[in-house]
């Protein structure tokens, strides 16, 4: 079942909103690629942080 803005892994609860939203998006894509949840979540968090850092306008748009 895909994660949403209201239903996401507990490990994402302390992320800033824009980072969390991107992490959810990435994690769902990884799950579609048949990654295990335990592997998809940390990868998604790391990549989301990198993405938001590299695209500061995304942070403003996602608020």
Image (cartoon, helix red, strand yellow):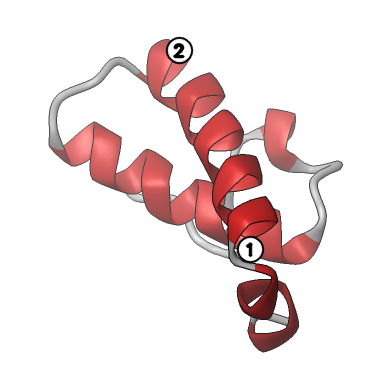
Q: Nearer the viewer, residue 1 or 24?
A: 24
Residue 9 in view in this figure: yes
Q: Considering only vertical position in the picture, is 18 above or below 31?
A: below
Badge 2 is on which residue? 38
What secondary structure is marked by label 1?
loop
Residue 1 visible, this orientation? no
Q: Nearer the viewer, mark 1 or mark 2?
A: 2
Residue for point 40% across, 24% down: 40
Q: Give coordinates of residue 29: x percent, y percent.
A: 26, 46
Question: Could you tell whether 4 is left or right of 6 in the image?
Answer: left
* Left or right relative to 8: residue 14: right
The earlier-in-sequence mark between 1 and 2 is: 1
Q: Residues within 10 Å of mark 1 (few under 14, many from 20)?
A: few
The residue lying at 76 percent from left, 63 percent from top is 17
Residue 27 placed where, x, y %?
Answer: 40, 40
- Indicate the position of residue 46 as horizontal and vertical percent values: 59, 30
Name the residue carrying label 1.
6
Marks 1/2: CA–CA distance: 20 Å
């Amino acid at each position: 079942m895909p994660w949403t803005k209201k239903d996401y892994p507990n490990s994402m609860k302390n992320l800033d909103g824009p980072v969390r939203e991107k992490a959810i998006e990435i994690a769902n894509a990884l799950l579609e690629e048949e990654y295990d949840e335990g592997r998809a979540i940390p990868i998604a968090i790391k990549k989301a942080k990198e993405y938001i850092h590299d695209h500061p306008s995304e942070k403003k748009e996602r608020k």
